[in-house]
Structure formats: structure tokens, C-alpha cells
Amino acid sequence: MPQEHDGDVPAVSIFPPFVPTAALVAAVLAQRIWPIDAGALLPSPWRYWIGGAIILLAMGFFAMRAVRQMRRSGQSEVPWTPVTEVLQSGPYSLSRNPMYLFMVVACIGFAILLANPWLLLFTPMVAWALQKWAIIPEEEYLERTFGEEYAVYRTRVRRWI
């Protein structure tokens, strides 16, 4: 049973979608300034199909399902809003952070689609930034709010996958 919130919300210090977007922009700029030829590794028609499939599958399986499940529970996907329950089914049974997992997987998909090795190199930094400035503050909030229920969930479901 969730506790009362008294205005307590996660102390997320960034707008999470900004992180992969900034990485994508930085990777495109880096590729223009210091090009790395990766087109030979995966020729044009294949990289579009493979990169696009990765993005769409991750979006459908992780992001859209997670958002839909949040909204059905009466919660918001906006990280600065109170949480009324710990979601534990659907994509939340595979990852405690399916929307952030989508952002990281989408970076890999876009790196393939754009034949941009820079984005592949920046992807671990995206994961690190999301974990440091969004995931950890959210987890601290959930632990504070739901105590033992969240602790048990954390032992059962991994942070990423």
C-alpha cells in the first residue's frame, strides 16, 4: 500500500529524453568533423532495416507499453510527479526502467541506421547519465515511498535488463 506523498517527488535533475537527443546531435556533429567510415560494415539498405527494426521494436516493447501501463494505473510518465504504485508487470517485469532502456537501445538503433560509430561510442555515456541523474533519484524516491515493497521488487527485477 503506498504511503501519502506530502509533495515528495523524485529528484530527477534532467529531462531524460534530452540525454539521448544530445548524444545523437553530438554524434552527428562529431561524424561531420571527424568522420569514421562505417558504411562498409553494413551496406545502406540493410542498415536502414536493421537500425529501424531495433528502434521500432524497442519503442513498441519497452517505451509504448511502459507509458500505456503507467497511464492505465493513473500515473504519469513525467519523472517529477508522485508515484502511486510500483508497477511490476509487463515491461516492468523485465526492467525497472523500460523507458530509459528504450532510450539506450534507440541510440544503438540510430547508430546503425545512420552508420554513425560516434553514437555507438556515446551510448554508454547516455546510459551512465540516465542512471546518475534520473534512475538513481527515482529509485531513492521509490524506496522512500514504498519501502519493503520496492526493495523486494528490486531484488527480483534488474535495473536495465
Image (spheres, rainbow, N blue to C red):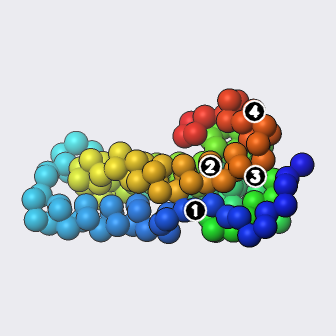
Residue at image location 10% in from the left, 59% down from the top: 34
Residue at which label 4 appears: 152
CA–CA distance in space, label 4 to label 3: 13 Å
Q: Amino acid at mark 3?
A: Thr
Check whether the beta carbons of the residues at disc 3 and disc 2 lie within 8 A of each other.
Answer: no
CA–CA distance in space, label 4 to label 1: 22 Å
Up the image or down, 157 lies above or below 19; here it is: above
Q: Residues within 10 Å of mark 2 (few under 14, many from 20)?
A: few
Q: Secondary structure at mark 4?
A: helix
Q: Amino acid at mark 2?
A: Glu
CA–CA distance in space, label 2 to label 1: 9 Å
Point out the image quarter for the C terminus.
top right
Give whichever of discs 2 and 1 has the lower sequence position.
1
Q: Secondary structure at mark 2?
A: helix
User: Left or right: 34 with respect to 19?
Assistant: left
What is the number of the mark on residue 140? 2
Q: Residues within 10 Å of mark 4 (few under 14, many from 20)?
A: few
Q: Residues within 10 Å of mark 3 (few under 14, many from 20)?
A: many
Q: Secondary structure at mark 3?
A: helix
Q: Secondary structure at mark 1?
A: loop
Residue at which label 1 appears: 11
